[in-house]
Image: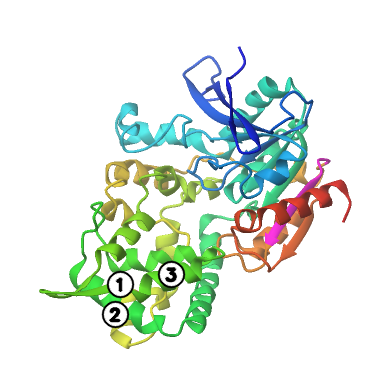
Amino acid sequence: MSAARYRQAGVVLADRRFSVPLDHADPDGERIELYAREAVAAGRENDELPWLVYLQGGPGFGANRFSGKQAWLGRALQDYRVLLLDQRGTGASATVNRQTLPLRGDARAQAEYLTHFRADSIVRDCELVRHEVTGGAPWTVLGQSFGGFCAVRYLSSAPEGLAAALITGGLPTLDGHADDVYRAAYPRVERKVRAHYARYPMDVERAREIAAYVQDRQPVLPNGYRLTLEAFQSLGIWLGGSDGSDRLHHLLEDAFVRTPAGRELSDAFQEQVAGALSYASHPLYAVLHEAIYAQGGRATDWSAERVRAEFPQFDGEKTLASGSALLFTGESVHPWQFDTDPALRPLREAAHAVAARTDWAPLYDPARLAANEVPVVAAVYHDDMYVDTEHALHTARSIRGLRPWVTNEFEHDGLRAGGPRVLDRLLAMVRGDV
């Protein structure tokens, strides 16, 4: 029976659900349900159109919930019928969070369960879904950030399912350990912070004032999050987005209010910070973020935390003592977050078990990528704070026929911020028009 259709402005939508094995190596074992939203341009519902499947960044984020033809979707609908897939564990697809994970048993059992939520399983899901929705015809994948990592896994393991691959800000290192990723990341983050202070020099003292207050009081935010100095520094994750520097500036400029008890962080500031730091909506990101780099028999072992010690300029306490500018941090997950964030506390032991695992299977096949025949194009954002440019370009050179578009016009969120233009350029490249 076909899914019921409903409408938004210029778009006809249908909710789709699919049953797939939890463990693809055991197809007759436990099954989980995936959710996806099908989208087609109004008036073209009955047309024979090629399919494009969208893989969101993360890990841990469901596919975009658009209103009408927002961002890149309108451009995609000119050529395709689009499937916005919630990857397993995200959105409405076998949701993983503090409420559901205890159903799996103790921390060891939870960690074992979570091994089935990486790119290798996501791609095998896609192949089962593809056969159901296209009748077996190849489709085009659009992978943003971690979705691009999944696209490279797709090219490694099931290229026969792809008509083309479009990647934005998501070319992974093929063989680098998480330590290599973070050693490259911290200097990049420092450049972004210095650039922010050059743009907003008044924020140097503002950040220091807030940091000193947080260090002294460690306030508990409205959602129960305990705001520590390191947690405050982690707001630098915003600096990887197109409007992140402005957002950070606006947050810092009105942090304090005067009260009968003296100067305090305002309710408005605390509410914004609580929303920015909480993993309640995407806990899988925190639990599996380093595992997306895990392969080759090595544990990740809280890589970002260990590597941070090699960059003492990020030590907030020493910074406050020395009088220098506070450095914010970027896209990284740390063990202390499983103490400060109430959404993550129940997942602490499982997260430690995941970080200690050494039996991760390889994610990519360099030989198969070197012989690739699928048309592949990739937007590589110069000095992307989230994905190292040199790592990305090395991977681009390792995939036969991949055409990179290296640009400094966008930050990591170029597909969102400049979606129609970014996607239009990639489609022209894959057609050979530019």
Callout 2 crowding tier (Cα within 10 Å): few <14, some 14–19, many ≥20 = some
Q: Position of residue 9 (x, y in %)?
A: 61, 38
Q: Callout 3, which amino acid?
A: Leu
Can you name the residue that lies furthest to the left here? 260
Whether residues under marks 2 and 3 lie with C-beta atoms below 8 angstroms apart, the answer is: no
Query: Which of the two discs, 2 and 3, labels the residue nearer the N terminus?
Result: 2
Say which quarter of the image contains residue 270.
Answer: bottom left
Q: Where, quadrant-wise, is the N terminus in this rendering?
A: top right
For residue 135, what is the image quadrant?
top right
* Label disc, if present, on residue 417 of the rendered structure: none
Residue 250 in view, yes or no:
yes
Report the Cα–Cα distance between label 3 and label 1.
11 Å
Label 2 or label 1, whichever lies nearer to me, is 1
Callout 2: helix, strand or loop?
Answer: helix
Side of 373 relative to 339 (left or right)? right
Q: Image quadrant of residue 188?
A: bottom right
Disc on the earlier residue, 2 or 1: 2
> According to the image, label 1 marks what residue?
255
Label 1: few (<14), some (14–19) or many (≥20) C-alpha neighbours in 10 Å: some
Can you identify the residue that label 3 sits on?
Answer: 248
